Image (cartoon, grey):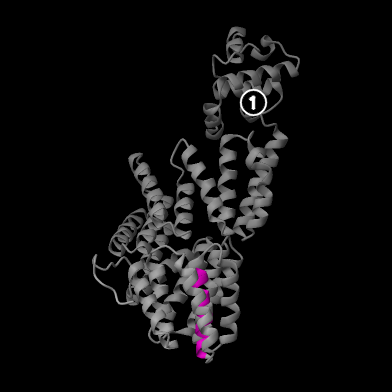
Amino acid sequence: MDPVLAGRLRDCDPAVLGERIRNLRLSRGLTQSGLADGVVTVGYISRIEAGQRRPDVALLEHFARVLATTAEHIVTGVDPARADEITFALLSAEMALETGSAAEALEALAPLTGEAGADLPRDHRDRACFLHARALESLGRYDEAIIALERLVENSSHVDLEAALALSRCHRESGDLNRAIDVGERALTAIKAAGVDGGDEAIRLVVTVAAAYFERGDTGHAVRIAMEAIRRSEEMGSPMARAAAYWEASVFESERGGLAAAIPYAQRALALLSESEDRRNLARLRAQVGVMLLRLDPPEATHAIEHLENARAELAASSAGVVDLAHCDIALARARLHDGDPAEATALATTVLGVTQEIAPALAAEAASVLGMVASRAGDTSRAGEHYRNAVALLTGVGQDRQAAQLWLELGAELELLGDADAARDAYRRAAISSGLRLPAGLPVNR
């Protein structure tokens, strides 16, 4: 039995199905006796057409043979030619996403989304909606992607892990860490209750939630979640699950300053991902290794550039979106500045600033800060001050999380070097607040 066909038959309204069978029969010039063809009684055909009975898959396939069509056509109302068009459009969209052409994916999906896709079978409609949201995410259009994914998650008759994972990730990328955690944990609770929490997607969702906790400042809890994910992925033996868990563990250790522990985790994840065809995540991990190398004391800029340039080429040829590319580019800008190439650092940071101001203000603030560093090191304090003030303005609109705290801290140090003590003090204060620290109520503050 075809499980997809069985699912579509189960979801189909018997009254709609019966009317469709009747119309097809009449269009072929058949009587109810001709449709029955000795397999069932005429009375049973009458009850099916009246919506009082639902045929099983075997009987449905019999009707398809008599009516010279397909069982899918009878259940969905979509004729075979249209079904081929739908399948081709979905495959084209998936291929476009895998090669980093999100705009092409949206174009391929246009006939299948919105009102144009209202008559699609439920599974095709849901798949088109998910791919559409993925394309929007790749383009940095997080609000639109979130709306589509929320509709998909809420209307699903089961836990759609792919959609829940993408929704949690979009909330995290847009800065809504509490929502990212809530979406992920609700999905994890549901699949645990259903006894299906042992697959690759479940592990990836766990580490996505852990990353949101970490960025929110709950570092201890995030690390414990990641360690548990590693334990479970080792038990499963899945390379993809293990790579995801090792990857997040490496990021956490790096952010906590534990590079000695972070790099071995990253190397394990790289080895596992290198065996797969997941080019996007392999590239993102290579970029993360480059970032870690820049954080060493002293920074290993040459090796970092090698990793980051390889990652950039792989990201450009994968399903990575503009934010993934911008993350890599700003790390590469920092590496180029460390390596004595301010012109290239400026070009990269300027590009990142241009594409992220509206969609990723924290990343745009980092780009503005890098431009300020370039100007400061060139002795142009006036220009440096302009860039740093731009970074301050961008960061002011960012939520209070670990990433914002780190950027405020770095910005404070740069402003201090520039001699702007008041602005530096304000940046340090904001770094403390973004990390979750608070002054006691009523304590006077010398501003």
State the residue position of label 1.
74
Is 199 above or below relative to 349?
above
Q: Position of residue 22 (x, y in %)?
A: 67, 16
Nearest to the observer: residue 209 or residue 390: 390
Q: Evaluate whether residue 307 shows in this view.
A: no
Question: What is the secondary structure assignment of the residue under circle 1?
Answer: helix
Q: Residue at x 60, y 44 (%)?
A: 128
Is 150 above or below relative to 358?
above
Q: Is residue 388 left or right of residue 264?
A: right
Q: Which amino acid lies under the numbered mark 1 shown in the image of this protein?
A: Ile
Nearest to the observer: residue 66 or residue 72: 72
Q: Position of residue 233 (x, y in %)?
A: 36, 56
Magenta segment: 363-377
Q: Position of residue 188 (x, y in %)?
A: 37, 47
Q: Residue at x 41, y 74 (%)?
A: 408
Question: What is the quadrant of the C terminus in the image?
Answer: bottom left
Is 295 above or below relative to 128?
below
Q: Is residue 371 magenta?
A: yes
Q: Is residue 376 left or right of residue 39?
A: left
Nearest to the observer: residue 40 or residue 363: 363
- All told, the count of numbered labels is 1
Q: Is residue 93 left or right of residue 393?
A: right
Q: Is residue 334 magenta?
A: no
Q: Main secondary structure of the magenta part?
A: helix
Q: Evaluate whether residue 381 shows in this view.
A: yes
Is 424 above or below relative to 314?
below
Q: Is residue 198 left or right of residue 128?
A: left
Q: Position of residue 253 (x, y in %)?
A: 34, 70
